[in-house]
């Protein structure tokens, strides 16, 4: 796990926070926290784009964000976990791991 | 109209990702402004479309359009790798993300 991918993962974490926030915020503090999470997410994405191809960053961000919100729904909000969901999550994670493996060879580092 | 809104929302998202790419090359503050405007417009159009199209369908099409468009633009205009393995893994992530949004 290198530093640049950790930035993408942190962006995903904040994305999951604000997606939950959009659905469940009821106070001004919750809305403020949600807004902060949105801004911080995009800051992290722009930062990650300095080191990794933007197309890769955005795809991983979208994919893991989806996986994260599905998992949060199952863990915290009583949504069901079907076989289809588990299967799709597995394909998604395999894709992310695969993309990380091939990106280490053609990352932007060095040719900027 | 709702479908036109979803497609436009997807295009706005692709435009936003393109601005992310250009920001890496040019560091002009206007890129950040365009990025914010396009993502805000994209989400506004998406939520408008969700009034008449089921949420999971709208979300799935929006994700699929935005992320695949962003990846294609990266390959065509910003010199990102067109390695078949990279395309395969991006496709796996996209197909499963769209699938999850359809069934969730």
Image (cartoon, helix red, strand yellow):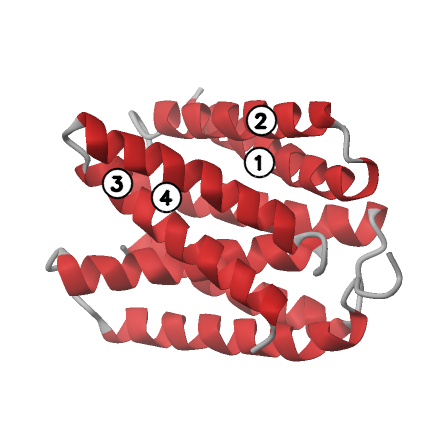
Please name whichever residue, A25 or A93, is drawn nearer the observer in this view of the structure.
A25
Q: Nearer the viewer, mark 1 or mark 4?
A: 1
Of label 2 and label 4, which has the lower sequence position? 2
Q: Quadrant of residue A4?
A: bottom right
Label 2 belongs to which residue?
A: B38
Q: Nearer the viewer, mark 2 or mark 3?
A: 3
**Residue B57, label in figure:** 4
Examine the rendering and report whether any part of residue A78 can be seen.
yes
Q: Left or right? Give the position of A101 relative to B77.
A: left
Q: Is the residue marked by circle 2 packed among few (<14), some (14-19), or many (20+) residues within 10 Å? A: many
* Mark 1 to mark 3 CA distance (whole Å): 21 Å
Label 1 belongs to which residue?
A: B13
Examine the rendering and report whether any part of residue B4 can be seen.
no
Q: The C terminus of chain A appears in which quarter of the rendering?
A: bottom right
Q: Left or right? Give the position of B14 relative to B82.
A: left
- Please give the name of the residue rendered at 36% of the width and 32% of the height, measured from the top-left corner: A35
Q: Position of residue A15 (x, y in %)?
A: 40, 49
User: Chain ID for label 4?
Assistant: B
**Residue A21, label in figure:** 3
Of label 2 and label 1, which has the lower sequence position? 1
Q: Is residue B98 above or below residue B15?
A: below
Q: The N terminus of chain A appears in which quarter of the rendering?
A: bottom right
Q: Are marks 2 and 3 in contact (CB under 8 Å)?
A: no
User: Chain ID for label 2?
Assistant: B
């Amino acid at each position: 796990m290198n530093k640049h991918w950790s930035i993408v993962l942190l962006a995903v974490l904040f994305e999951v926070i604000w997606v939950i926030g959009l659905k469940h915020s009821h106070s001004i503090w919750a809305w403020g926290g949600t807004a902060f999470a949105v801004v911080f997410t995009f800051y992290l994405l722009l930062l990650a784009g300095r080191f990794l191809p933007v197309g890769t960053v955005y795809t991983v961000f979208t994919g893991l964000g989806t996986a994260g919100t599905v998992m949060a729904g199952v863990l915290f909000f009583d949504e069901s976990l079907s076989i289809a969901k588990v299967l799709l999550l597995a394909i998604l994670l395999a894709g992310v791991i695969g993309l990380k493996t091939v990106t280490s060879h053609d990352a932007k580092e060095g040719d900027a | 109209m709702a479908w036109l809104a979803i497609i436009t929302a997807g295009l706005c998202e692709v435009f936003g990702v393109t601005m992310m790419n250009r920001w890496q090359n040019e560091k002009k503050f206007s890129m950040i402004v365009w990025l914010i405007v396009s993502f805000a417009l994209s989400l506004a159009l998406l939520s408008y479309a969700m009034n008449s199209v089921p949420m999971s369908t709208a979300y799935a099409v929006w994700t699929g359009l935005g992320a695949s468009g962003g990846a294609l633009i990266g390959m065509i205009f910003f010199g990102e790798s067109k390695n078949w393995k990279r395309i395969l893994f991006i496709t796996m992530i996209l197909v499963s993300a769209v699938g999850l949004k359809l069934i969730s």
